Structures are given as structure tokens and as C-alpha cells.
Amino acid sequence: MHLHERKKYMINKISKVLLTLFITVVSLSGIAYAVDSEKVVENTTAFLETLNVQNKFTGAMLIAKDGVPIFTKAYGLANRSFNVPNQIDTKFNLASINKMFTSVAILQLVEAGKISLNDKIIKYIPDYTNQKAANEVTIHQLLTHTSGLGEPRMEEFNRISKDLLRKVEDYLPLFSNESLSFKPGSKYSYSTSGYMVLGLIIEKVSGQSYFDYVKEHIYQPAGMVNTDAYENDYVVPNLAIGYTALSARPGEVKNNLFMHLVKGGPAGGAYSTVEDLLRFSNALLSNKLLEKTYQHGNYRKSRC
């Protein structure tokens, strides 16, 4: 397996683990009557303690019931060079998990009547390089990874300076002239590029940068005070550094700063805390961010 393929595999694997933990927190609120909270805490902490001892997990955990934390704990080091421990308010890179913020932003614009899920890319990005894709791919297909847009060209991504990738539009040359992998809507294939296009649509429709939009319409209403696409070359308090054994010397790890973007975007790379993720969950479930109709997969039946 090539290095960039291994990186992609690990990022996806980590994202799925983190997302599973987050969904578990949310699910406790929805099925609290059937859940033994003490048992959940006991089993989860035992599992993470084992991983921590084996040096397979560092991070923070929050378990909530009915939207209220019932257990929190941090494990391991946020910075191994200086032995800085993780805290509950440590900011961790979310990898692809912050695609959910982009999804919410798009549905907010649908809810406001500013876009339709059936709209094509061409309506909002008329100068998109691949005109065939622009005329065929819908917003709904971008959201559901059924667009046929693939992944950014990793050879090009690895070659250029990450310092050049700070705005959403900066990513377009990495994929916008690529042919579609399949007929839009015909099958599922995970697409980072699709969410970059969604971010650009958010900018075109709202008149704001993607980063300003999600801050004003998602983070602030939800009370998420420690979430943003922080720039890694600036000083950010309580920001964890990630580590990997990939391509490291045997028995050692390397920080992953040079694998990361300098600044995250619509497809991933933002930072948050477990407390802020709970705030996001609570805001979403209490309809602060979206009407209930848009939370349960029924939006295709609504005014889209």
C-alpha cells in the first residue's frame, strides 16, 4: 500500500472511530430509558484505559445522558515533546468529522429557500472547470457521496506547499478538471472533493467565507467556543498535536503536522473539543440549527 493510500486509510479509520464515539454520546440522549448509564461508563472507560495503556489511544472522552455530561476524562499527551497532558478542553483535529458542519450549513440554506438539493453545481459555480460535472452533479449528490467526484490528486497535494491552501477556492485545481468516476447518482463513493465544492457553494450563496458562515450560523448559535478551522502556523491555546507511526523509525512516532493542512476546510481539518461536540449535538437536537424536518432524512420530501 502506497504511503498516501495508507494515510487516507488511517484518516478514514480514525474518523470512523471518533464519529462512532460521538454518535454514542448522542444516542444516550435518545434511548436513555433503555440504557444502564453506569454500565456504559464502566465499559467505555475500561476499553479506553486498555487502549491507553497499550499506547493506542490518547484524547478526551465525554459521555452524556439527556444532553448532560455524566462522565468526562482525558488520556495521554497533547504534546509529547513537552509532556503536556490532554485536558477535557483540549482542541483535537476532527479530520473528516467536520463534514457534518458543512452538511448542516447546506441544509440551513435549503431551509431558508436559498438553494435546492436538486440544483446543479453550474447554477452557483458557472466557471467550474469540468463543465460536464457542473451540469450533471446535484447538491444532494455532493452531500451523499454519490456525485462521481473523486479525491484530490494526492501527488499534486503532496508536492505543493500547504501554505497555499487556506481558502476553499485554493483546492479547486487539485480536482476540478478531473473526469467523473461514474454517472452521478448511480453509486456511492466517498468524496472529499464533493465537500470542497459544497463549501464553495456556501460561499457563493451566503456572500460570506465558508469559515465565517459556519462560525456565525453553527458554532456561535450552538455555543461552540473552542471550534474553528485554526491555522496550524499560528499560536492556538490548548491545541493537540497528532502523532503517527507511519513512515517513522521502528518503535518511534512522528508528529503529523506536515501531513495536515495549514488550515482545515469544508471537507475536514477543523478543531474542536468533546464539550463543543456535545453542544453541537444539543443544538441540533433542540432545533437551534435546523428544523426537525431536516434532521431525519426527510428533507428530500420537503421544499427542496
Image (spheres, rainbow, N blue to C red):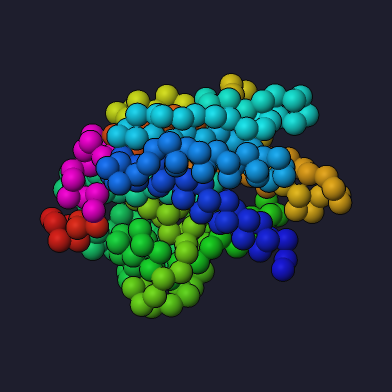
Can you say which quadrant of the picture contains the N terminus?
A: bottom right
Residue occupying the point 76% across, 49% down: 245
Q: Is residue 224 visible?
A: yes
Q: Could you say where residue 231 lies in the image, as x and y percent from the top left?
A: 57, 33
Answer above or below: position of 6 versus 208. below
Instruction: Give 13 or 99, whichever is nearer the viewer.
Output: 13
Residue occupying the point 15% across, 61% down: 301
In the rendered image, the residue lying farthest to the right is 250
Instruction: Give 138 or 57, whichever is nearer the viewer.
Output: 57
Q: Could you say where residue 147 lies in the image, as x and y percent from the top left?
A: 39, 68
Q: Which residues are magenta?
A: 284-296
Total numbered labels placed on residues in the image? 0
Q: Is residue 8 left or right of residue 25?
A: right
Q: Is residue 114 visible?
A: no
Q: For residue 186, which quarter of the picture?
A: bottom left
Task: Tell me if residue 133 is in the magenta stretch.
Answer: no
Residue occupying the point 30% across, 61% down: 140
Can you say which quadrant of the picture contains the C terminus?
A: bottom left
Q: Could you say where residue 246 lies in the image, as x and y percent from the top left?
A: 75, 53
Q: Could you say where residue 255 lies in the image, as x and y percent from the top left?
A: 73, 40
Instruction: Give 302 or 78, whichever is nearer the viewer.
Output: 78
Residue occupying the point 63% across, 56% down: 10
Instruction: Give 63 or 258, whichever is nearer the viewer.
Output: 63
